[in-house]
Amino acid sequence: MPSTKSNVRTNRASLSRRYLTTLRIIKAGATNFVRNMSLAIAAMAVMIVTLTIVLFSIIANTTFSHTIAQITSKIDISVYLKDSVTAKQTDQLVSQIKQLPNAESVEYLDKAAVLKQYEQQNAGNKQLQAAINQTSNPLPATIHIKPRDLNKIQDIKDFLSKPAVEKLESDPPSYSGSLKQAIDNITHATNVLREIGVIAVIIFAVVSALIIFNTIQMAIFNRRDEIQTMRLLGASTAFIRGPFVVESCIYGVVAALISVLIVRSILVTAASTLQASTFGLLDINYATNYFETRFWQFLGLQLVIGILIGAISSVIATRRYLKFRSK
């Protein structure tokens, strides 16, 4: 029993020492951060730019995807049939189209349904309504095809271009070309933005790491006498390196907080002050709502990225410039 109690006391004392050591390392790191503020500003500035680009790229990419999905839902292919096409031929054609891998949905409207739909769409045009009532129904029966993947729409075009199918068509099919072009433009812009964002993040992340690396190097040089004294007094390598790592992590925390505030300010300003619902291809309202509903997730992501950049840079720097002092 006495031995067991002694072990418990020893373990508690060991945990207490580790806890106090950790607190001292954190306190020393915070002190170094304040002491080296002039050196830290450059490192944090580049980290802020890096994290802002990361966050804005995520929001913009999601917003563009949402815009593409909205426009895609409005795109369909309209096939116009001759009045001489029989019900059997129509059913057979609709069945064949439904079997196409890229045909998500197929809807057939006979002449009466097409006319009713046309009248509803032009309900405010009284002259057009009067002209339609004075003539027989000139509109052809129509098959509406909604493609599953716009990049594979050529498969549907090839099927509709078959001679057997063209014999049934009164006019060439309509492919909502303007909407398809809009989607192509947005997709291209999204891809370009993503590539630019990735390249910019990599460049600024490397620059941030190098600046932190040099900042730690200068801090070690400025404190070389203090570090040597600590080693002579028996301080462990971890105790000496720890404050530098904590200091760099604080760079990441501050940069993450500022980057989130910058992105939020930009979105709020664009949505309210400028009274804009869109900014070019970017849906500001959707982007703002997306950011607000996931604010804490984005803040956590920024903190993780910022701390990782700072910690990795400082660990490499301390291992390189403190290795001789640890002997």
Image (spheres, rainbow, N blue to C red):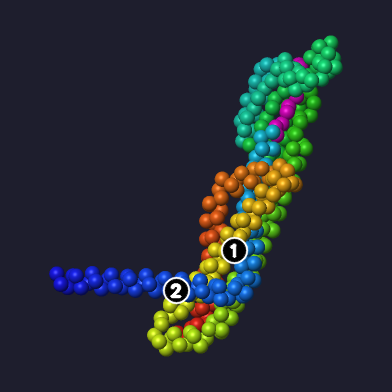
Name the foreground residue: 193 vs 160: 193
Drawn side of residue 239 relative to residue 51, left or right? left
Amino acid on which disc 2 is placed: Ile
- Which quadrant would residue 233 be assigned to in this image? bottom left
Question: Which quarter of the rendering shows the C terminus?
Answer: bottom left
Query: Within 10 angstroms of label 1, few (less than 14), some, or many (20 or more) residues?
Result: many
Drawn side of residue 129 relative to residue 7, left or right? right
Q: CA distance from mark 1 to mark 2?
A: 21 Å
Residue assigned mark 1: 255
Amino acid on which disc 1 is placed: Ala
Q: At x 55% / y 73%, what residue is drawn?
A: 34
Q: State which region is magenta.
A: 75-85
Q: Where does residue 177 sit, x and y in percent of width and height?
A: 77, 37
Question: Which quarter of the rendering shows the N terminus?
Answer: bottom left
Image mark for residue 3: none
Assess whether residue 82 is covered by the magenta stretch.
yes
